[in-house]
Amino acid sequence: MSEEKWNITTREGLQVTVRPADLEDEGLMIELFDHVSPQDLRFRFLSAIKHVSRKQIADLIGVDHNAIESYLAFIGGSEIPVATAVLACDHKKKRGEVAVTVRSDFKGHGLGWGLLNLMVQEARLRGLEKIESVEDRSNYDTIELEENMGFKAEPCPDDPVHLLLSKSLTA
């Protein structure tokens, strides 16, 4: 497992430690997603699910870490998972897709902003030119957060339900 860690202090003063997730973190990921609202699960996985399956967790953490990296955020120095983020790079290493999920009882503290900002920094370090996310049009809070961070929204082609939000990293 990578020893790389980041410390984030949110606008509300919440102290979190973020590190890459690995195969040993399956139980922590299950615990985290068990504390995410059904609506936020739908927003994260872009479909209605009641519970995140072990296969979905394995797909998030048992991957090529150069192409896809999952991160876990913990309260202070604890092992209580409060959020996760994923940065998935295309095969040309030009574009990355990001997704952030925050535990329901930790929403509203700036954790989403902090993790999205970290994903933008990581995308820049990887030399990506653009970072994107696909959002359900009814996910107003996330769309507003991303737009406030400089992401531009546009309709997804042939998809009236989702928006593509993107941010150039080259300027």
Image (cartoon, rainbow, N blue to C red):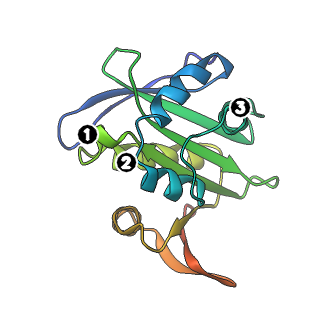
User: Could you say where residue 157 lies in the image, as x and y percent from the top left?
Assistant: 68, 83
Badge 1 crowding class, 10 Å Cα cut-off, few under 14, some 14 to 19, many 20 or more, is some
In this rendered view, identify the residue nearer to me: 136 or 167.
Answer: 136
* Circles 3 and 2 in contact, beta carbons < 8 Å: no
User: Could you say where residue 93 lies in the image, as x and y percent from the top left?
Assistant: 75, 52
* Circles 3 and 1 in contact, beta carbons < 8 Å: no
Q: How far apart in space, not on screen, are marks 3 and 2 (Cα)?
A: 23 Å
Q: Disc 2 marks which residue?
A: 112
| The disc label shown at residue 10, or none | 1
Total numbered labels? 3
In this rendered view, identify the residue nearer to me: 34 or 156.
Answer: 34
Q: Disc 3 marks which residue?
A: 58
Badge 2 amino acid: Gly
Displayed quadrant of residue 20:
top right
User: Could you say where residue 81 lies in the image, as x and y percent from the top left?
Assistant: 42, 26
Badge 3 amino acid: Ala
Q: Residue furthest left?
A: 12
Point 57% across, 57% down: residue = 48
Badge 3 crowding class, 10 Å Cα cut-off, few under 14, some 14 to 19, many 20 or more, is some
Q: Nearer the viewer, mark 3 or mark 1?
A: 3
In this rendered view, identify the residue nearer to me: 13 or 38.
Answer: 38
